[in-house]
Amino acid sequence: MITFIYHFAPTSHQLKDERTGNKFRIGDNVMVKVARVSLDDKKIDFDLVLKKSGAKKAEVAGKTIRKRRKK
C-alpha cells in the first residue's frame, strides 16, 4: 500500500503531495472514500477513488467558456 502525504498551500489553495508533486486545487473533480476517522486527533483519512484529469474548472461546473477577441 502506497501512502501519499499532502500538504495544504493556503496561498494557492491546493494540496500538494510531497513525494510525487501531484496537486489538487479548488474546482478539481475527485471522488474519495472515507478510510479512517480519528476523533481524538481530529483527522480524517481518505482514499482517492477517481480523479478526472484534463477537465477545465468551468466545464466541471457546467459553465461554457467564452473567449474574447482582441480588437
Image: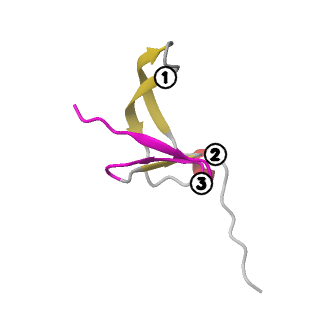
Magenta stretch prevailing secondary structure:
loop
Residue indicated by mark 3: 12
Q: Which kind of residue does numbered mark 3 sit on?
A: Ser
Lower position in the chain sequence, tag 3 or tag 1? 3
Q: Is residue 17 left or right of residue 67?
A: left
Q: Please provide percent x and percent y for residue 71.
A: 77, 86
Lower position in the chain sequence, tag 2 or tag 3? 3
Lower position in the chain sequence, tag 1 or tag 2? 1
Disc nearest the viewer among 2 and 3: 3
Crowding at mark 2 (Cα within 10 Å: few <14, some 14-19, many 20+): few
Relative to 66, is 40 above or below?
above
Relative to 34, is 57 above or below?
below
The N terminus sits in image quarter:
top left
Alpha-carbon span between mark 1 and mark 2: 32 Å
Alpha-carbon span between mark 2 and mark 3: 23 Å
Secondary element type, mark 3: loop
Q: Which is nearer the eye, 42 or 70?
A: 42
Q: Which kind of residue does numbered mark 1 sit on?
A: Lys
- Quarter location, residue 4: top left
Q: Residue furthest front?
A: 40
Secondary element type, mark 1: strand
Q: Which residues are magenta?
A: 1-20
Question: Residue at left 72%, top 79%?
Answer: 69
Q: Please provide percent x and percent y for residue 11.
A: 62, 53
Question: Residue at left 59%, top 51%?
Answer: 57
Residue indicated by mark 1: 43
Relative to 31, is 58 above or below?
below
Please check the rendered image and state whether residue 8 is part of the magenta-colored stretch, yes or no: yes
Q: Which is nearer the eye, 40 or 24?
A: 40
Q: Please provide percent x and percent y for residue 50.
A: 39, 36
Residue indicated by mark 2: 62
Crowding at mark 3 (Cα within 10 Å: few <14, some 14-19, many 20+): few
